Image (cartoon, coloured by chain):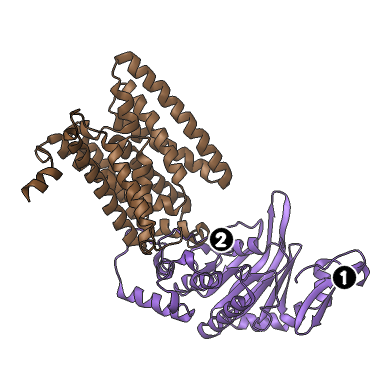
Amino acid sequence: MTDDRTLSAAASILEVDQISVALAGRQILDQVSFRVAAGEFTGLIGPNGAGKTTLLRVILGLQKPSAGRVGVLGQRRSLRHQPIGYVPQKVLLDPDMPMRARDLVALGADGDRYGLRLPSRPRAEAVREMLHAVDADRFADARVGNLSGGEQQRVLIAQALISRPRLLLLDEPLANLDLRSSQEVVRLLARIAREQQIAVLLSAHEMNPLLPVLDRVVYLAGGRAASGAVDEVISTETLSTLYGHNVEVLRVQGRVLVVAGEAELADSPLTGTD
Amino acid sequence: MHGVYSAVFEPGFFASSQVHIAVIVGGLVAIVSAITGVFTVMRGQSFGGHALGDVSAAGGAGALLAGLSPVVGFVGLGIVGAGAMDMIGVRRLRERDLATGIVLGTAIGLSALFLHLTTTGTATTGATQQVLFGSIFSTPAGTIPVVVALGVVALVALAAVYRPLLLATVSPDIAAARGIRVRAVGLAYMLALAVSVGLSSLAIGAILSTALLIGPAAVALRVTNRTGRALGLACLFGVAATWAGILLAYDSYYWGTARESLPVSFFIVALVFAAYAVSGLPGIRRGAG
């Protein structure tokens, strides 16, 4: 595994080591291991129910694993105080909430502090810069609940980035976006990862919009994971081993399709992504 | 000029000690309710706030029956009810709705029992009116320090958790990932809600407390996009409606020939409703809600 040696030489931001999670007697994750380095854009890919959200919650310290360890920036304890930016899957921004995009981003900066907030020019400036970085200047003063899905996603990303985390986790950020918005969000994240040397880990059940920008893939299926470079992981051999039955990876007009292999094609519909 | 003035402020308004107490208690209650209410509306807990008013009514009625000051019962049982609602709230939304409805019904039943026993036992028919529709003009001066102390507790609790509470309202997941103790922050808010509903039960009645909690907040959310400004505007609307309601109720004594005041609660709630209706007009409304 030459790849892993290169990684440990580079700054490894996140190390997931043999993580297993069992919930209500069901094995959700089974000895999942991978690493993410600074500036890398990693896709956490897998069908619905593969355990992607659970894995992200374990990394955030919101879910206790039944076995294994997670290290962020080499530290194995008190994950809650690690600088991790997080954009969860379902954020229902009610149109009734009197909150501008600018206010939500400011909460990303100091939302965990107690007591009232005093006006601060540096914070206002940081918010303005961050809104500019995600190309949200245009709707900075609009009510967040009235923004489109793609615009809300950009504001949430700014909210997650303003505390200058080294690691950014996003749970299905493309799930409810149209093709154009999801391409914009993906390009934005790729640029941020590169420019600010942030490790980005993004979960998705549909990998095609991500393939042009992904540095690495962690593919989850049945609670187990395969990780590595995109071409290594998204291959007939690797995914067949992971799924435990024959699947075939087809590349059609620049898109990747994962379909059940020959033996099962007769009675099994398309599996996995797309 | 003098004619207009005396038409607005009927004789003795500024000299009446009852009016002084009503203005102080009403103003404070309006401020606490308005600030708590902005969070209640943002968190989508208007129904819970109303149910808490009914729990508070049972407390007030129980306190009268036991010979205690109603404010003790209003706030005391309100806090117990808020704690129970927090325990229910950790489960599914639909389940929370059902449980809230059932608690609400039980609370009204208890109020009915306590009020029946109080009125038949002591022959003070005023108890029902007092608990359900408030007693701002007959609040004893000695209650003011209690009201002030409780109001300050609620406002300090909300100020302390202001930012974590906002973040947890936007997304409990983001808040938890930031290391915020979402549950504890939610409890601080529920405490403020219980106190605010209890105080407003004292002023305008347990049944109507929701109007002062939700109304000014709902108007403020419609006219501004900014959280801080919404809090300020809600206070302004709440205090204005309360004071104007006190004035109208006082003046109503001189209307017609009956020489009897109309209930202050009616005027406050009517003014809140009018503000809400006006805030829905095109050109005033900012949000989509």
Chain A rendered in what hue?
purple
The answer to whether one can see residue A240 in this image is yes
Q: Which mark is residue A61?
A: 2
Q: Classify the position of the N terminus of chain A by image quarter.
A: bottom right
B55 is higher (above) or lower (below) than A177: above
Q: Which residue is at the front of the view, A152 or A34?
A: A152
Crowding at mark 2 (Cα within 10 Å: few <14, some 14-19, many 20+): many
Q: Classify the position of the C terminus of chain A by image quarter.
A: bottom right
Residue B196 horizontal side relative to residue B147, left or right: right
Tell me the SS state at disc 2. loop
Label 1 vs label 2, nearer the camera: 1
Q: Going 44% across and 49% down the picture, which residue do you hit?
A: B186
Residue B21 horizontal side relative to residue B115, left or right: left
The answer to whether one can see residue B192 in this image is no
Q: Earlier in the sequence, mark 1 or mark 2?
A: 2
Quarter holding residue B266? top left
Q: Which residue is at the front of the view, B156 or A31?
A: B156
Q: Going 24% across and 49% down the picture, which residue do you hit?
A: B240
Q: Which residue is at the front of the view, A272 or B45?
A: B45
**Whether marks 1 and 2 lie on the same chain:** yes
Marks 1/2: CA–CA distance: 35 Å
Q: Which residue is at the front of the view, A11 or A177?
A: A177
**Which amino acid, mark 2?**
Gly
**Which amino acid, mark 1?**
Asn
Where is mark 1, residue-wise? A246
A62 is higher (above) or lower (below) than B115: below
Q: Going 76% across and 62% down the picture, which residue do you hit?
A: A222
Residue A147 is situated, as x and y percent measured from the top left of the image, at 49, 69
Chain B rendered in what hue?
brown
Quarter holding residue B166? bottom left
